[in-house]
Image (tube, grey):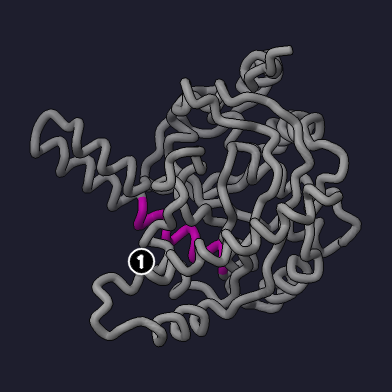
Amino acid sequence: MAKLSIRQKYGDLFQQMASVSQADAKINAENVYEEANPLTRQFMDKLVGENLADGSRIEGRENFEAFFDAINNGEHGLILMEHYSNVDLPALCYLLEHDKSEKCNELSKRIVAIAGMKLNEANPMVRAFAESFTRVVIYPTRSLNKAEETALSEEEAKAEEAKARKINLAAMKAMDKCKRSGKAILVFPSGTRYRPGKPETKKGLREIDSYLRMFDKMILVSINGLSLKIDPEHSEDMLADILDPEKMIFTASKIYDCKSFRKDYMATLSPDEEDPKQKVINHVMELFDIQHEEMEKVRLAD
């Protein structure tokens, strides 16, 4: 039996979500922070709940709880998470919210994701999907590079660069306000979903180094199991993703002190290293690989 795309199975649900959508269709410096829309969230929880196979759960509960305690006590907290599909954030929040731990339940409400503006501007259904969760919207470097490549003139390219600069400056201010109010900032260090056969999509972004300098504590959250898979023939169409429910496990690493983590790893590099910032995030991605492989053994053995 052929598996259905998310559009095919949930087209009616997305139409309902779009009807209660409140998010802006265009992002500018004034609307980069968007609170979760509870009206669309109820639909997202239904979608996620129906596509998590038995045994789906969080692991490293004590690490999630310790991280919550840290941000609750005034530390600025960063969650770096692997990125395989567009239900990564919804599934994490769902599992935290339905966990037996009250601290995990509360942490799910504190998460603010850093999201690319494409989620708002792609189409109304994707926008309704995204607005179910609180986020700070940025103009990603990848998107700016594409915009500059397709610009008709140098003036257009400069205008787009100025727009990106304004949006990202506003986003940094919004993120700073969030972290100072006890929110946990969640970032996908690859900046995009991993695509099989395309190792460049799993490379950590150099910009992540700046987050390590801006935060106090971080956890690395790996994802094992995939209930929504990218259709390789329509990889840019988010609603063409294929539903294939699996047991999903979200695992939190131990808590790292961001500045010590960065400083200690930098100290291992040669003084002649050309790009130490990229080396730091490469190390983060190596830690993800180790954690992911260890938990995959657990998932398959369940």
Q: Is residue 227 above or below residue 272?
A: above
Q: Residue at x 68, y 58 (%)?
A: 110
Q: Position of residue 100 (x, y in %)?
A: 91, 57
Left or right position of 187 against 100: left
Q: Residue at x 42, y 60 (%)?
A: 172
In the picture as drawn, the residue positioned furthest to the left comes out as: 154
Q: Which residue is mark 1?
A: 278
When asked about the image quadrant of residue 54, the answer is top right
When asked about the image quadrant of residue 227, the answer is top right
Q: Residue at x 60, y 77 (%)?
A: 256
**Residue 42: in sight, yes or no?**
no
Q: Residue at x 18, y 41 (%)?
A: 159
Q: Is residue 246 above or below residue 161?
A: above
Judge the density around disc 1: few (<14), some (14-19), many (≥20) Cα neighbours within 10 Å: some
Q: Which residues are magenta?
A: 168-179
**Residue 179: in sight, yes or no?**
yes
Left or right position of 268 against 19: left
Which SS type dominates the magenta stretch?
A: helix
Q: Which residue is more in the foreground, 132 or 297?
A: 297
- Quadrant where the N terminus lies? top right
Kind of element beneath mark 1: helix
When asked about the image quadrant of residue 122, the answer is top left
Q: Which residue is more in the foreground, 122 or 181?
A: 122
